Image (tube, helix red, strand yellow):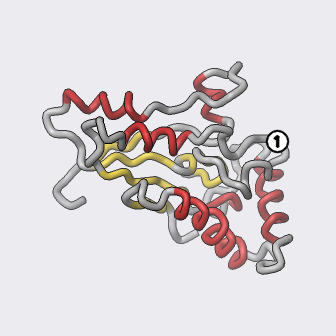
Amino acid sequence: MSGGYGIGWRFQGGDQFSRVVDPSALEDTLIDGKEVCDQFADFTKKPDYIMINLSNPADGMFWTSPHPALDNLSPNARLTPKNDQLMSFIDGFKDIERSCKDMKVLVYVASEGPAKLKHGCKRNSGCEARVAAWKNYVAGIPEYGSDSLPNLKKAYAEIIIGHYAEKFSGKIDGYWFDHCSH
């Protein structure tokens, strides 16, 4: 990316996106990557990359793409969307007919994960119950057997990131892991 420039574009994960766009919506409103790409048509120099988020910005609890371990995990919020926001965006953005097909797509991930290892639950309503649900899920898997810090980190990498790495293989060009010491 040296010598180039890019643009970051953020949207909310889980049920938070629908509540922001249309609080009465029963289903997720899909992000149209084609519309975002078309906005670059008038740029004198098109960006070299766009960074979009897989998890919420600075929040590893909510995600922009369904995940089998997270879809029904929370007792009080949907952590993933019903429709695949991220895949919808990427498919439209990288459409072969679009001028963005050669732009790199980077994906932002808050590496604190659903255990909220960096930010904790200071300002999030219902956060403690969601963190407890994730810890119980991890502890209930024989391979991990407890919710110790090393097990939470390993489960996050293997279960969450591993799934998304396979799912988006060949569709994205790289990841940006925020606050990686957690």
Residue at the spot 77% in from the left edge and 41% down from the top edge: 77
Image coordinates for residue 37, horizontal then vertical, percent: 33, 34
Q: Position of residue 139 (x, y in %)?
A: 83, 72
Q: Tell me the quarter of the image containing the C terminus.
A: bottom right
- Determine which quarter of the picture holds residue 42: top left
SS for callout 1: loop
Residue at 65% in and 35% down: 16
Q: Quadrant of residue 18?
A: top right
Q: Which residue matches tag 1?
A: 76
Query: Relative to 115, is 46 above or below?
Result: above
Give how far across and how far down residue 7 sits, in percent: 32, 43
Q: Nearer the viewer, residue 139 or 86?
A: 86
Q: Quadrant of residue 126?
A: top right
Locate residue 104 relative to residue 175 in the image: left or right: left
Q: Is residue 175 left or right of residue 4?
A: right
Q: Residue furthest left?
A: 44
62 on left or right of 43:
right
Indicate the amino acid at tag 1. Answer: Asn
What residue is shown at x 37% (from left), y 58% (from top)? 173
In what quadrant of the picture does the N terminus appear? bottom left
Residue for point 82% across, 59% down = 132
Residue density around tag 1, few if under 14, some if 14–19, many if 20 or more, within 10 Å:
few
Q: Is residue 115 left or right of residue 53?
A: right
**Number of dots carrying numbers:** 1
In the rendered image, the vertical position of residue 175 relative to residue 24, given as above or below: below
